[in-house]
Image (cartoon, grey):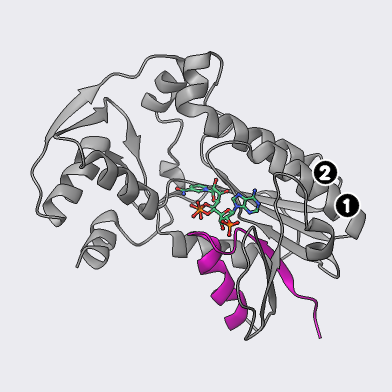
Amino acid sequence: MTSPLLITGGTGTLGRLVVPRLRDAGYNVRILSRRSHESGDGIEFMIGDLATGEGLEAALDGIGTIVHCAGSSKGDEGKARNLVRAASRSGARHLVYISVVGAERIPVVSGLDRTMFGYFASKRAAENVVADSGLPWTTLRATQFHDLMLTVAQQLAKLPVMPVPAGVRYQPIDAGEVAARLVELSLGKPSGLVPDIGGPRVYESTELLRSYLRASHRHRLLVPVRLPGKAARAVRAGANLAPEQAVGHRTWEDFLAERLR
Ligand SMILES: NC(=O)c1ccc[n+]([C@@H]2O[C@H](COP(=O)([O-])OP(=O)(O)OC[C@H]3O[C@@H](n4cnc5c(N)ncnc54)[C@H](OP(=O)(O)O)[C@@H]3O)[C@@H](O)[C@H]2O)c1
């Protein structure tokens, strides 16, 4: 019998979609979470915290491949460092990491850049931790998931007028399509940095929000706001996009129609 794969973030938007795909491919899965969950049907939950390193040794015991999907808006470098340290000790053979398109192209220089775009810098730093780990690795960069764009749109729609980052475009992708690619990579050989994965179309942010408003039968005034700083300039120039890698199929409109039905 093959050893289970460890999925960090297996309770999150992406990880939740990776787990059933690995099960369908015939693999047992271990999920690292900060909370307790009931195990069963080839899925074992282990409690652990990547920010402190607690529980990692036990979670990695007997693991060959790690799919590192855990993440948050801050501190992904530290989480990667703790994971890599424990995985090097446990003798893991493949570390698969999900990063974000633009991680290496968005300069986070000033405090202002960090406040708005620090996430990209922490993903870049985490990528480097993975690449320098000495473990065989694979990293995939994805554009923003539909789910994230929807959460942002729903938050903004709570305001009477919706501020929109002027000149910023997005290329949202279906998290299920990213999960399918991650599974393919996890079951393959360590490949280093692989080609980005992006959604089928690039949209102006106003266009994304307007389709959300239409689909949710709301009316709001959109107010473009020009974001200051070098990171914002890079994003306006398209650093967060992968138009040459528009390999996703499910569109934002399809996602909205289904989710808001
Ligand atoms: N969302 C996007 O648009 C997007 C785009 C490109 C790349 N990514 C990357 O894809 C990954 C998954 O994103 P997502 O949207 O699925 O995230 P999510 O829904 O917010 O889920 C985050 C996951 O991370 C786990 N986690 C967070 N902090 C942890 C810690 N200290 N220790 C252990 N587990 C921890 C959570 O597990 P528990 O709460 O169960 O502990 C949860 O399963 C992230 O690395 C993200 O940067 C996301």
Please state the horizontal and vertical placement of residue 235, each as a whole percent of the image: 41, 27
Left or right: 36, with 86 as reference point: left
Please give the range of residues in magenta: 1-24
Numbered label attached to residue 88:
1
Numbered label attached to residue 244:
none
Please state the horizontal and vertical placement of residue 222, each as a whole percent of the image: 15, 32
Please state the horizontal and vertical placement of residue 258, each as a whole percent of the image: 25, 67
Left or right: 207, with 248 as reference point: left
> Can you see residue 93?
yes
Depth check, front residue: 169 or 155: 155
- Closer to the eye: label 1 or 2: 1
Magenta residue check for 103:
no
Residue behind mark 2: 133
Looking at the rendered structure, the kind of residue marked 1 is Ser
Q: Marks 2 and 1: in contact by CB < 8 Å?
A: yes
Depth check, front residue: 44 or 93: 44
Identify whether 47 is placed above or below 218. below
